Amino acid sequence: MLTLFKNIKTYLPNQSIISNSFSYSYEILLSASQQFASLVLNGKKDLNEARVAFMVNPGFDYVKVQWAIWQAGGIAVPLCLSHPLPSLEYVIDDTEAILMIVSPQYENLLKESTIAKNIRLIVLGKEEKIPLAELPYIDKNRKAMILYTSGTTNKPKGVVSTHANLEAQISTLVTSWEWTNSDHTLCVLPLHHVHGIVNVISCTMWSGATCEFIPEFSADEIFRLFKKGKINVFMAVPTIYFKLITYWESLPITEQELLTACMKKFRLMVCGSAALPVSVMEKWKIISGHTLLERYGMTEIGMAISNPYRGQRRAGYVGLPLPGVNVKLVNENFEDINEGDSGEILVKGENVFIEYWNNPEATVKEFTADGWFKTGDVAIIEDGYYRIMGRNSVDIIKSGGYKISALEIEEVLRTHLLINDCAVVGLDDNEWGELIVAALVVKDKAINLKDLNTWLRTTIAAYKTPRKYLLIDELPRNAMGKVTKNEVKKLFI
């Protein structure tokens, strides 16, 4: 039995999830997931790592479905709830999913596609009731999950993690951040990301704690739940903290003071997925009484570096390597650097994923010959603490907690009839981390940019659409004809 489910047997009476005004114990959650696993198996003894895609709203149903897939021997493939159909179909096709599980509101979006692809579709609330089946034994070295992340090419890559990888990621955080079964957290993060899946939900469940969900982001609702006094752990991305600060500042002084008093009682507040501006960190400390715990991780490795739970948390730094995670900095030749120099972060450990799905070339490219994963992030060590300096590639934009490929957006923009060429870059921004902007070389400068954004959102996710455009006559290029992205950024200043 996987360690996660062994742990749960200790906490069966405990409250596991609160969602849609209902509370569920671990006993109810485990039983529901086992029943659903029987439906997923559909008469089979074992899914044997078949891929199961699911588009399920955050809450009890999400965890039930994810656990069911794992207990049936499948590989869980969570889909982004805000992605347009082409993006969803890319993941479904790439993983060769045999089964699709959806919340009712996504049935119409995917029904036609699943019929055309001969994929079995289960709509929650409409599923048939079947007898409880005998569930297969799941070895921890089996593949457990595929999450898609944009790389330096225009096609997202599927990051494959085993149960052992996930156990390493979860157990390290539970120990380092001192999770207990008395903790109560609020999930406000998307659940096709490691931040929400591992750091929030999985750490909560591993510890026998409580995870509460809200249907959509609302600063008012978040603060309302804070005031109830049960939540003591909160994790978010810089964009969310920025929005909470803005909302808090709009409140009457008496309401501000009440919220501050409530938040001071929390034991832990964490920020990650994008660089946290020092100004946001300082404002949040005034508002909440907490120095946010910044950490560093990515889809391929989970969390690798973290400021200490007990000890000094330094603004602008991501902290120290977590226990069991090996980290080093190297130069462009992958040689160890001199102390004080900046270098690319390499990571090795049980937490590191095993491969990119059906992409052996990319897998080989992103690992050194002796097994270190190349993160593509550049850092420097100062007084023992790691400080992130930026990306190796300007083609990766970190905006609102998402890692976004500029090349993917450019490829779509170039298909527009009125666009000859383009360059997409990220600009430093306190709210978003980086703001996505696009320089366009167009056939007609009367192009309607509002219509352009509407058109873009039919093909790519809304969070990937540029927030500012600049019309220019030609893109800056070097002697080799390559667009110089740093010069493009200067055009927006």
Image (cartoon, rainbow, N blue to C red):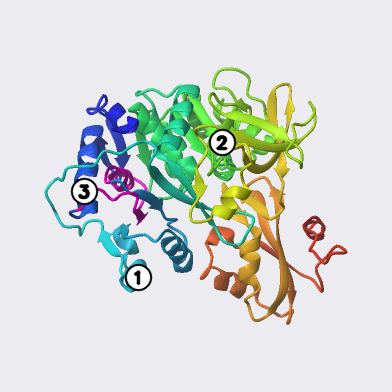
What crowding class fits label 1: few (fewer than 14 Cα within 10 Å), some (14-19), or many (20 or more)?
some
Q: Residue furthest left?
A: 131
Disc 2 to disc 3, how far (Cα)?
A: 42 Å
Q: Quadrant of the N terminus?
A: top left
Residue 400 makes an appearance in the image: no
Q: Secondary structure at mark 3?
A: loop
Who comes first in sequence, dot 1 or dot 3? 3
Find residue 117 and name its label: 1
* Amino acid type of the residue tagged 2 in the rendering: Cys
* Amino acid type of the residue tagged 1 in the rendering: Lys
The residues colored magenta run 44-72
Q: Nearer the viewer, mark 2 or mark 3?
A: 3
Task: Measuring from the top left, give residue 402's x and y in whole percent.
Answer: 56, 50
Is residue 48 part of the magenta span, yes or no?
yes
Residue 51 makes an appearance in the image: yes
Is residue 107 part of the magenta span, yes or no?
no
Up-down: is 417 above or below 189? below
Residue 407 is drawn in which quadrant? bottom right
Find residue 45 and name its label: 3
- Left or right side of 438 for 477: right
Find residue 271 and name its label: 2
Who comes first in sequence, dot 2 or dot 3? 3
Q: Decide which of 79, 267 is in the foreground and name it.
A: 79
Who comes first in sequence, dot 1 or dot 2? 1
